[in-house]
Amino acid sequence: MNKIFIHIALFLLVASSLKATNLILHVQDKSSNKAIGNASVQYFVSGNASSKIANSEGVLILSNIHFPLRISCTALGYEAIKVSIAEKDVKQQANDFLFEIKMEKSAVLMHDVVVTAQNTPVLATQSVYKVNTISAAQIGQRGAVSLNDVLNYEMNNFVSNDNILGSSLSIGGIGGQNVKILLNGIPVTGRENGNIDLGQINMNNVKRIETIQGPMSVIYGSNALGGVINVITNQSNKKLTGTLKSYFESIGRYNLSGNISVSKKRHSLQTSLTRNFFQGWTPKATEDRFQLWKPKTQYIADLQYTFSFKQGKLNYYGSHLNEKITNKGSAIVNPYEGYAFDEYYRTQRNIQSLGAEVSLNEFEKLNLLQSYSSYYRTKNRFKKNLVTLEESETKSAGDQDTTIFNNLNLRGTLVSNRIKNTDVLGGYEYTYEVGKSFKLADEIQKMSELGLFLSALYHYKKINVQPSFRYIYNSRYASAFSPALHTKFDITSRTQMRASYARGFRTPTMKELYLQFIDQNHTIIGNPELKPEIGDHFELGLDHQQKLDRSTLSLSFNATHNKIKNLISLAVISTHGQLRKYNNIAQYSNWMLNTQAKWKNKHIALSAGIGYIYVEKSTIIPQHEIFELTNTVSYTFEQYKAGINFNYKYNSKQPVITVDNQFLYTNPLHIANISLQKGFIKQALQCQLGVKNLFNIQNTTLNGAVTNSGTPHSSSTGMQLFPARSVFNLFN
């Protein structure tokens, strides 16, 4: 009798094991049956939740599943769907089962898929980080040509302009030297005065921009103490597509760009070419050859190739920038000659990268990204004979200069979900940089840094906890340790609360360490004894999304606190302000409160935000407050295939530290633009007509607060912000 029971038990065990099988899912558009790539599927096996991402063809394999199976599927631009699959619902193919998931397009998009700092692509609402996304549609609505045009209207961002060094960014009062700019995950090199020129990041062929405020040093290393901005270009999976864009602006901007992409089976190739030309602008109507806003010409080329295979894909990305800025001096005429001093600034930036995404098995995924970047900038000053037009080089200190930076970046990550309810990410990042310039001590300097990082995302029901750390070894500063802890709690399916702590760091740049810049008016020297900047960041946020009939509403509230030790600043050494040296002389501390509301239906998209920043008094910075408002409105006239867009931002004031180390404030600033879009020839041709700098804000008075020595400053000076109000049109 016992043997009979044993045989029955073995039979039932074998029978149940046969029910554990592989299920191949095909995620498709319900109306067109086209594959939906990168869809996210969550499923339950033995009561435990697991998730996977479909490939570019909308296919994913679930291993060792049991029927009935409950799954939920989400994809960008589609309504989320939940399905219970029984064995009778599937088709059998060899030893596997097939099932098709049909998804309906969403009339109102509530969620964005994000990749920056993620183990795998996830919905923004699922990320433990507070990730802000700016879509291609939003970029177009702002009439944005370059990255500075986009970030001008983002919360906590202040974009300043220099006619030679370009546009720079501060986030919540933290300077651009602490903000890491990525292009498809590749660090952008070539900082002038500590900042990447945002005007050199072209918006042609950009799919979206993802930003994270606060230290991301654990994942992205140095220069990410203030945050990360990742510009992601478009990848087409259509057989053959091409676009041509022209942009004209009344102040003298004439741009032309084109994209071509080809896709066949496993191969995808895309190229983009852009020419941006600005003839220069000055507010006075005069014959003077000098222009306040300098003429600029840019040539930008991108090439991207992707090879897809069963286990993943290989990717090549290359980018080239060639820029020339012309600074013509005023004419000097006397009875004997007529001449002027002209300056030319030429910049070349090249990026070459190879990437690989490989699924090693059903649990592990390997990502590799290797890049080599070169930055080459020259300054040449000439005395030009205005009669013969001959030019001769001037011989004063600083008149002729060449700066070269070469950067090698090797990065690899391994993602594993082998442990129950836990996604583990481990990785390395190695950076080697060589700088060459007459302004650097010994004319050549080298620096390398190795980072090893590890994070574990534990998710149990409604709770997500992600501790992480990074170990850094820098060739100049030995070793360091950077920890972080991010948590997310799903109060409901539509309400998330996030709380996080992160420690960031920034190693001094080569210029801050070894600069030796001397001209007729300035002497600026580096300091090899500088200490790295260390920042602590605390954040608490609440997000809510609500579907209202045929519209959606999203609300967010964020409170953050930043504290930076060893802040690097130029210290005035001489009484006349001519001799300055980089020093660790300050501690920076601020508090930020932000609230934002977005409402959208089929025709209208509204967004409004309020921000408040309180900066505590420190060694060189007085206590001050910043208040800002943002507002965007878009309305679509569906029957006319047209739309109207309005963007507005108000800043109560912005702090500015001048070259002679005085702390000043701008006047309150109002910026806005408005545009009208219209589609023609079955939407194949898009035309946009608009006005930028609607309130004609060209400059602002800098009002004295106190000098860094603590004495009152009663005089005021000016700061250039924008050229005059202008009309633009864009054809695409």
Image: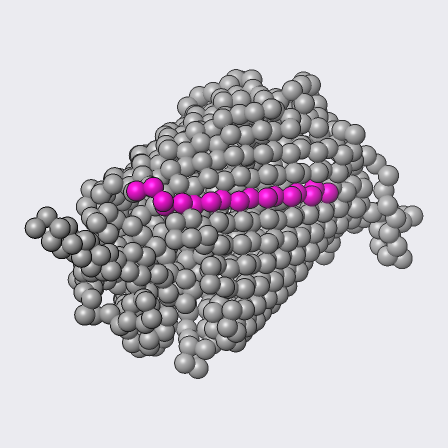
Residues 88 and 204: in front is: 88
> Is 116 on the left or on the right of 257, as rendered?
left
Magenta run includes residue 657: no
Q: Residue at x 26, y 72 (%)?
A: 91
Q: Is residue 416 magenta-colored? A: yes
Please give the name of the residue rendered at 50% of the width and 49% of the height, measured from the top-left corner.
367
Vertical order, 341 against 728 (above or below): above
Residue toward you, 165 or 81: 81
The extreme bottom residue here reads 681
Quarter assignment of residue 511:
top right
Callout count: 0
Residues 446 and 95: in front is 95
In front of the other: 421 or 241: 421
Q: Which residues are magenta?
A: 404-420
Q: Residue at x 69, y 56 (%)?
A: 322
Q: Position of residue 112 (x, y in %)?
A: 35, 55
Report the side of 550 relative to 519 (left or right): left
Residue 135 place in picture, x, y as percent: 41, 58
**Left or right relative to 228: residue 29:** left
Q: Is residue 524 above or below residue 62?
A: above
Colour logic: one colour
Q: Is residue 192 visible?
A: no
Q: Position of residue 682 (x, y in %)?
A: 41, 81
Query: Would you say the magenta stretch is mainly helix, strand or loop?
Result: strand
Determine whether, in the image, residue 137 is placed left or right of residue 27: right
Task: Name above or below for residue 440 compared with residue 85.
Answer: above
Identify the residue at image location x=32%, y=58%: 62
Spot occupied by residue 512 in the image (x, y as percentages of width and height):
65, 29
Tell me if residue 367 can be seen: yes
